[in-house]
């Protein structure tokens, strides 16, 4: 049984928040790397990350040529770290 968008968003947020920081700021992760870590499809990742962006828990960089992902990289915000 597939997980809900809410469950996928929670799992992705936790994984992003727990990534070690490389200096100042947040660690960016590309969609394909996130898919490999999470074991989720591009559609599942896109839906969950879009929900997290709308909530202010993560930010993303959207560029041309990132299909099947809606973004090139994503990173957790301070609000996202606080929310987990």
Image (cartoon, helix red, strand yellow):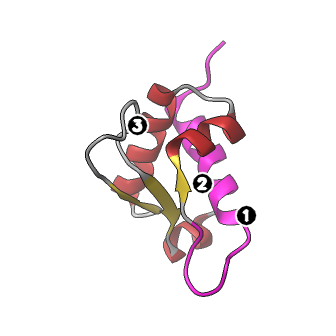
Q: Which residue is mark 3?
A: 69
**Magenta stretch holds residue 4:** yes
Q: Give above or below for 38 relative to 42.
A: below
Which comes sooner in the sequence, label 3 or label 2?
Answer: 2
Q: Residue at x 61, y 29 (%)?
A: 40
Q: Give above or below for 24 relative to 65.
A: below
Label at residue 45? none
Q: Residue at x 67, y 36 (%)?
A: 36
Q: Give above or below for 38 relative to 18.
A: above
Assess disc 3: are there few (<14), some (14-19) or many (≥20) residues with their C-alpha within 10 Å of its C-alpha. Answer: many
Q: Residue at x 55, y 27 (%)?
A: 4
Q: Give above or below for 4 relative to 11.
A: above
Say whether residue 51 is left or right of residue 44. left
Across and down, in percent, residue 16 comes to 63, 58
Element on which disc 1 rests: helix
Across and down, in percent, residue 77 comes to 49, 71
Towards the viewer: 2 or 66:
66
Which comes sooner in the sequence, label 1 or label 3?
Answer: 1
Q: Which residue is mark 2?
A: 13
Say whether residue 50 is left or right of residue 79. left
Write down the region rendered in magenta: 1-27
Q: How far is disc 3 from disc 2 in space, using C-alphas?
A: 17 Å
Q: Which residue is mark 1?
A: 18
**Magenta stretch holds residue 23:** yes
Assess disc 1: are there few (<14), some (14-19) or many (≥20) residues with their C-alpha within 10 Å of its C-alpha. Answer: few
Element on which disc 3 rests: loop
């Amino acid at each position: 049984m597939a997980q809900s968008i809410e469950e996928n968003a929670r799992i992705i947020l936790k994984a992003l928040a727990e990534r070690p920081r490389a200096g100042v700021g947040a660690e960016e992760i590309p969609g394909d790397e996130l898919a490999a870590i999470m074991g989720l499809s591009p559609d599942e990742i896109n839906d969950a990350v879009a929900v997290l962006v709308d909530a202010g828990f993560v930010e993303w960089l959207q560029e041309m040529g990132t299909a099947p992902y809606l973004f090139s990289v994503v990173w957790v915000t301070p609000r996202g770290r606080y929310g987990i």
